[in-house]
Image (spheres, helix red, strand yellow):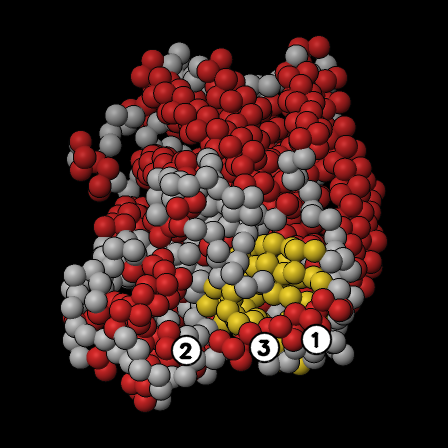
Amino acid sequence: MRGSRLLGLIAGLAGLVAATSAFAIPWYFQTPGSQLARDIDHLHQYVMWLIIVIFVGVFGFMFWAVYAHRKSKGHVAEQFHENTTVEILWTIIPAIILVVIAWPVTKVVIAQKDTSSPDLTIKVTGYQWKWGYDYIKGEGEGISFVSMLATPREQIEGRAPKGEHYLLEVDNELVVPVGKKVRIITTAADVVHSWWVPVFGAKQDAIPGFLRDMWFRPEVTGTFRSQCVELCGKEHGFMPIVVRVVSQEDYTKWVGDFKKAQLAQAEDPNKKWEAKDLIARGEKVYGANCVACHQATGKGMPPAFPALAGSKIVNGPKEGHMDIVLNGKPGTAMAPWGKQLSDTEIAAVISYERNSFGNKSGIVQPAEVKARRK
Amino acid sequence: MSAVVHGDDHEHDHGHEHGGHHGPYGGIMRWITTTNHKDIGTLYLWFSFIMFLVGGIMALAIRLELFEPGIQFFNPDLFNQFITMHGLIMVFGAIMPAFVGFANWQIPMMIGAPDMAFARLNNWSFWLLPFAASLLVLSFFMPGGAPGVGWTMYSPLTVQMGMGMDFTIFAVHILGMSSILGSINIITTILNMRAPGMTMMRLPMFVWTWLITAYLLVAAMPVLAGAVTMTLTDRHFGTTFFNAAGGGDPVLYQHIFWFFGHPEVYIIALPAFGVISQVIPAFSRKPLFGYASMVYATSAIAILSFIVWAHHMYTVGMPVTGQLFFMYATTLIAVPTGVKVFNWVSTMWKGSLTFETPMLFALGFLFLFTLGGFTGLVLSLVPLDIQLHDTYYVVAHFHYVMVAGALFSAFAGIYFWLPKWTGKMYDEKLGQIHFWLTLIFFNMIFFVQHFLGMAGMPRRIPDYPLMFETWNKISSIGAFGFGLTQLLFLYIVLKTIRSGAPAPQKPWEGADSLEWTHLPTPAPYHTFETPPVLK
């Protein structure tokens, strides 16, 4: 009777799986978009079938014993034990099965590690909590941008309905051409992150101070989404990865448009700004970069993430304020923003902080930031 | 195990005569000053149950936040603190002390020794634990809260944490000290205090697995202490072991941690195997199929566990030869583990089976632990691990090993030996309800997490994309069911102690080790003051 209950449970679980495919709830790997991902999928199915056969075999014996060799049926225990032949067999056969598994797997491992002769090389830098992309070799060389979560805070905090790509949308998507071998070099600015696109079967940790690499060759166009997969602090769950694979023509067009836009957007760091404009600009920079830790109220989450409201640094000399924003504070989550933000953006956010949350301590011009950079 | 024991009546009388003696103190002082292995075993078991509840409440907090998308209850920082402390408390506070509790109660009785070799050291090994646990829990109330770094405490994230990180580091030091002292005690006891005739190859399997575990602990715990000490000096004293800017390497931390971390998996699993190897023969009324091969398989697992650590790190970017070496070495573990599973099934084959609660938990263990072993095989293969690493698939995998493995085995052991310890029988019906609810809710929590991982949900995130909602809801509902079911377990144990029916000396027909064949129920306070004679 107990056996039948267990069978019922298994049937229930199987039913659950069947039901999910009907409602399209994801329960298996995403459809592969590269040879590597397809290899991984095939290996998985191969190993799973072996496992299912072994599982059914071993537990067939167990459940048969549970069913047939029970005391309540009057079965009397035989007292046999130890049988050298059987014991040698059940050591050697699994070892042979392992070799059968290892052979195809080894071939994929070697292919996965072969990052030679790429068409396009992109450096991916993990920051707390966003990704930096630098196109360092191939078409689009010199393109560089930061990519961060585009989902509004209101959706996360439940004050607005969640969109279709909740937590999987970014302001600047990584764009790559279809059919080209893309080599990704990872590194990080602060702590360990991990960059992953499941559709390409490509995952590589980003280690601060070191460069690591991997590759993928996208076979289909489309937008593919993922997230950071190594715990990297408070906002670990909020640094998505979005890759848009486009045709070669679209890619060439994107590269051209990007470079043109970059030129148009370039701001003169020597321009004198009105306080009002600078503070308004700073509010946007703050909302994109600072709000996760220092909060919209400027009260922070002390002591890990200090308050800006009434802060000694914010209300003290401008130099001290510029230094901490430009260079960060080692050993804390305060990043050196000098590398990621322009002089204008840094001047704007400092001016905003010095004139918000009850602070009143004047503005900083981009030229001053430029002079303060080391 | 088929040790034939000659009854020693004098021993029994002696036991009864002094049965009420608990040393010079009564009340709380009895427990603080006790050097009796049975008292200390009891302390370990209650301590671990309390920590199980504390760690469990954190797990429920995690599942509550993950019930639906969005941030509802805990900010991401606090969420990270919960996942960190849930892991550390469950591993070091709940599972490990539970099996040390079993070791304390059972090893002297099973080998015919009067007590542990170093009785006062035994007392200290236990009493270090509440202090370590307090440090862990107190870290929540430090400025900056508990560390939010995960139980693996990867550098350099640890450098950003507040004072709670230092509390955790010291707690790990103390826990490690306690484990090492306990292990030295266990090794010495088993090697030197066996009754005449109790040769090594006649030791009950539980004792063998603990002997091997104790060696693993002595070898692995100092490595962890080293890793966290280097973290401490990186934090405060200007060293740069794990900082590239000073010539260090964050990946070095991971290597050192997992050199401890993988043996740790077997430190938890081997005593669990030991309990199962006692329970299955007892309820099959048939000796363990391959005693010698079980001993060799256990030793092989222990040795292999030291050369597979980097399979936790396939994605850090190691050379292809490194990946292949660690992959081959890891898959090799499947061989001795398979030998163990085949032995358990063969022990049941043509036995005379009954299904009391300990046997049910042992079968649940066998079935689900093997499932966890198979997902381990999947994860050992580099390309598959690269896809699944740091996703919920891994979370599902290690909970099948830790919960369905270690916890189910601990439940099996408690129901099995509770009559001997308390002198009273537990309520069989309630025990079986506890088993079935635990089994169902466990699978509800963790089976669906395989799907989440394969579909791409990273672990350790406080919020998730909408497509993962269904499985997370099922998992969270399962978690609350599982949590409530464990209160039933507490009720069953308390009911047994207060009003259980008196248990006979050997309530389990097929049990054959010394505590059943030779000692009355309940086991007297002092046992085997003169060694039993084994033929």
Query: First in sequence: mark 2 or mark 3?
Result: 3
Q: Residues within 10 Å of mark 3 (few under 14, many from 20)?
A: few
> In the figure, residue B492 lies in which quadrant?
top left
Judged by depth in the image, the label closer to the viewer, 3 or 1, is 3
Image coords of residue B412 (percent x, y): 51, 29
- Packing grade of label 2 (10 A; few <14, some 14-19, many >=20) is some
- Circle 2 SS class: loop
Q: Which mark is residue A120?
A: 1
**In the rendered image, the vertical position of residue B161 relative to residue B18, given as above or below:** below
Q: Residue at x 44, y 62 (%)?
A: A129
Foreground residue among A101 and B173: A101
**Image coords of residue A205 (percent x, y):** 56, 66
In the image, residue A167 sits, relative to residue B515, either above or below, namely: below
Q: Amino acid type of disc 2?
A: Ser
Q: Residue B134 in the image: x percent, y percent?
A: 26, 48
Please tell me whether mark 1 sits on a helix, a strand or a loop: strand
The residue at the point 35 percent across, 86 percent down is A270
Circle 3 residue: A260
Q: Earlier in the sequence, mark 1 or mark 2?
A: 1
The residue pinned by badge 2 equals A342
The number of discs equals: 3
Is residue B77 something one can see in this rendering? yes
State left or right for residue A40 relative to residue B480.
right
